[in-house]
Image (tube, grey):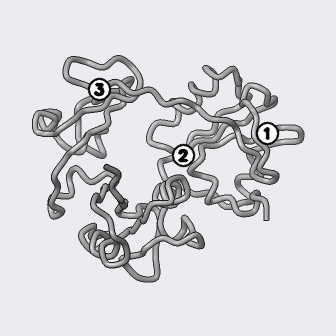
Amino acid sequence: MACAWGVVSRGYGGKAAAYPLLLTPETTTAEAGDEPVLIYQRTGAPVAVAPERAAAVKAILAAHNVQIIITDDGLQHYRLARDIEIVVIDGVRRFGNGWWLPAGPMRERASRLKTVDAAIVNGGVARAGEIPMQLAPGLAVNLRTGARCDVAQLSNIVAMAGIGHPPRFFATLEACGAHPQKCVPLADHQTLAPADVQALVGEGQTLVMTEKRRGEMPCFCRR
C-alpha cells in the first residue's frame, strides 16, 4: 500500500525569514539550503526546514496528510522521536580517523551502528550486515537550454563540487569517461557568487557541477 511522505531538515546553509519554512516552487537555496531544495525539486514531496526539527514535522502535518516523515541527517537529533533509523556510510572513507567533528568525520561513536535498523554502504565494499548501494550517474543537463547529454560527450571540463567529499564526484566523472582539466573542491554547502563561478572557467571550457548546486545558479539557468 502506498503511503504519503514528507521530509524535514535543519536547512543548513539557508536562512529563512521565519521558521518552520514549508518549501514551495519559489523557495530558494538561500532560504532553505541546497539539499532541501534539491529534495523538493526531485521528489515533489512536502519538505519543511527548521533548526528545531519537531517544528518542521508539525508544519508538514498541519499542511499535508502524510503517514511517514523522513528526517534528513537526523540520527543525532535526539529531541525528535523516531521509529526507524537508517545510516548511510561512505564505503570508501568509512569512518576516517575515527575522531568526532571537527577533528574527524564522525558525529557519534561507530558503536552507535549496533542500535540502528539498517546500515547502507554507498560505494566501496559492504561488510557483513551492511546493505550495499551504488549511485547511478545521470545525464549532464545544460542549465541554459535544458538539453541533456552523456557527460563523456563534453570537452574541456572544469569540475566543481561542494559536497562532503568532492573527490567522489571527480572520480565519478572519470569513471563516466569525462576527464576534467581542472577540479575545484569546495566545502560542503559552500556558496559562490556568480562572478566567482564565472571566473572558474575560461574560453571554450565547460563547467560541470553537482545537481544540488543548480539552485544556486539562477544566472545560468534558462528563464
Residue 116, x across and y down, in percent: 16, 39
| Figure check: 217 above or below 95 | below
Seen in the picture, residue 175 relative to 151 is either above or below; the reply is above
Q: Residue at x 30, y 73 (%)?
A: 61
The amino acid beneath tag 1 is Thr
Q: Position of residue 115 (x, y in %)?
A: 10, 39
Q: Residue at x 55, y 58 (%)?
A: 41
Numbered mark located on residue 206 in the image: 1
**Residue type (three-letter) at the residue carrying disc 3:** Ile
Which residue has dot 3 on it?
131
Q: Is residue 194 left or right of residue 163?
A: right
Q: CA distance from mark 1 to mark 3?
A: 36 Å
Seen from the viewer's position, the closer of residues 208 and 40 is 40
Judging by the rendered image, the residue that carries numbered circle 2 is 162
Left or right of 111 in this view: 161: right
Whichever of callouts 2 and 3 sits on the residue coming sooner in the sequence is 3
Q: Residue at x 19, y 47 (%)?
A: 84
